[in-house]
Amino acid sequence: MDSTEPLLVVGASDIAQTSLSEMAHACGLHLDAGSRLLTLFGRPGAGEQRVVTAVLQDGSGRLSVLRAFAKHGEHYPCLTERHPAAQIFERELWEQTGIVPDGHPWLKPVRYQGERQQRMTEHPFFSVRGREVHEVGVGPIHASVIEPCHFRFMCMGEQVLHLELQLGYQHRAVEALLLQRPPQALSTLVETIVGDSSIAYAWCYCAALEALADAPVALETELVRGVALELERVAMHLGTLTGMATDIAFLQGGATYGRLRTAIINAAMRCCGSRFGRGWLRPGGVRFGLGDALRRDLLATLAACAKDFGEVNALMLAAHSVQSRLQDTGTVTTKAARELGLAGLAARASGVALDLRSSRPGRLHGAYPVALLTEESGDCWARMRLRMREIDESVRWLTQVLQAPGHDLGAAALHAPALPRPDSLCVSMREGFRGPVIHVIETGTDSRLVHYKVQDPSLQNWFGAALAARDNEISDFPICNKSFDLSYCGNDL
């Protein structure tokens, strides 16, 4: 396996096992040296034991895994005080295992799973005191067709002083459900965890099973999967641009972006029978190839969309009303984005250059690279512009791949991999349209799943969306929120 693949497979016995405090110290040293904490989670062990795992990535892209054994209720010195990016992971670890990060400044449930689900009304919201300060509560039921979340604004007049989000209303116990089936029979469940990221989730799952079975797929299969993922990226970015244009009453943009999104998802349906790409990817390959006629169809669709996309972008970027609403609205500075550990597009829009397609290109993006794009201003304008630029780059990449000679993409190769190897752990990642989707699969002695960790980039980015609302008018929040376009169910699982 290419050492730059967005994958890591290790034997459970090859992971150094330490005490919880030793692991926290080691994590701190990695973070001090500039590494990024990709995920931190726990699972049940023997009896009252809890197994805690951390995955980190250093500046060169190299992945490392740390592991510790702890008891329910055990304490350790928290990482968050020195490294705020760890705050959401430590909260999730505490909620799921009872392991307590001493000194954590914001120790609140992430999604109210298990018995805590009955106590959502008791959430300890942060409060700001003052004679002219008032609270505005919005949700979890909203006026439009939208996922549930409660937003608690602390305002002085129209100015937002602080926003806190309470998520968890869509908790479905996804990780527990994934352990109730054989590892090879999870495709239909995995690709519906976050409906608008079906391809990214399915690819993480497929790549993990293939790596654990030592059954690599052909480059042609990777190319078809890459086409599927970039179509998903284009469609979902267009959907976000539709919402942003509509929110600020730029109706020509809203109508045009919406029409273009429909053209892209309809093209995906012609490829695999589903507008969201469900059923396209399976462990061992793909169920539908891209024959010559279909490649010509996709190229024609992309060319037509690119023309209209360029024209509507020019109108949107030149409109003074758009500039007035988006520039300097919902700003997250580069420093704040780094400290909060923002991921994916939300990070890149604030000048933090993070993209798995560049840091872990593997065979696919080594042969067909993708440009790493960033914006610097970190406001709604930057997030809009970056989506426009990423669509252009995805269309360029898709056109290059679909026109590339020497690859037979039409033969749908599907070879079901063998059972995953026992007592192993696999970290599988893909850069979805929001950012890195991360799956960590661990097998036991009988090759059955011991744990399946799922992580959406929204988990790390919701704090950024809340921060972006500060010092803005409360009426600016809808456009701030849409510019991030995060997943509620991706957080709630």
Image (cartoon, rainbow, N blue to C red):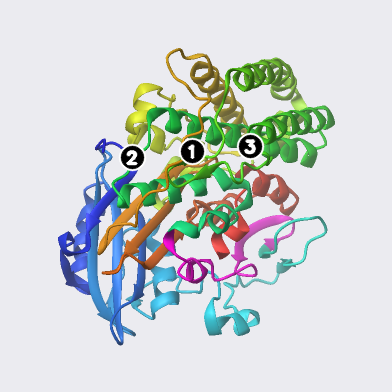
* Residue 165 on the magenta span: yes
Please state which of the two labelled residues, at mark 1 or mark 2, is closer to the viewer.
2
Q: Look at the image and give the residue range highlighted in magenta.
A: 155-183
Q: Percent position (x, y) of residue 493?
A: 55, 64
Name the kind of residue labelled 3 in the image.
Cys
Q: Percent position (x, y) of residue 424?
A: 26, 60
Q: Residue at x 23, y 70 (%)?
A: 68
- Residue 350's disc is 1
- Residue 272's disc is 3
User: Badge 2: few (under 14), some or many (20 or more) residues near its Cα, within 10 Å?
Assistant: some
Q: Percent position (x, y) of residue 151?
A: 67, 64
Q: Residue at x 58, y 46 (%)?
A: 197
Q: Distance between the residues labelled 3 and 1?
A: 36 Å
Report which quarter residue 112 is drawn in. bottom right
**Which type of secondary structure does the marked residue at label 1 adopt?**
loop
| 25 and 189: which is toward the camera | 189
In the rendered structure, the answer to whether residue 190 lies left or right of residue 317 reads: left
In the rendered structure, the answer to whether residue 42 lies left or right of residue 171 reads: left
| 388 and 426: which is toward the camera | 426
Q: Kindly indicate whether the residue at mark 2 contacts the one at mark 1 (C-beta within 8 angstroms).
A: no
Which comes sooner in the sequence, label 1 or label 2? 2
Name the kind of residue labelled 2 in the image.
Pro
Report which quarter residue 379 is drawn in. top right
Q: Which residue is drawn at 59% across and 80% down?
A: 117
| 387 and 478: which is toward the camera | 387
* Residue 154 on the magenta span: no
Q: From the image, which quarter does the N terminus lie in?
A: top left
Name the kind of residue labelled 1 in the image.
Ser
**Which type of secondary structure does the marked residue at label 3 adopt?**
helix
**Does 457 sit above or below residue 268?**
below
Q: Is residue 333 visible?
A: no
**Mark 2 sits on what residue?**
216
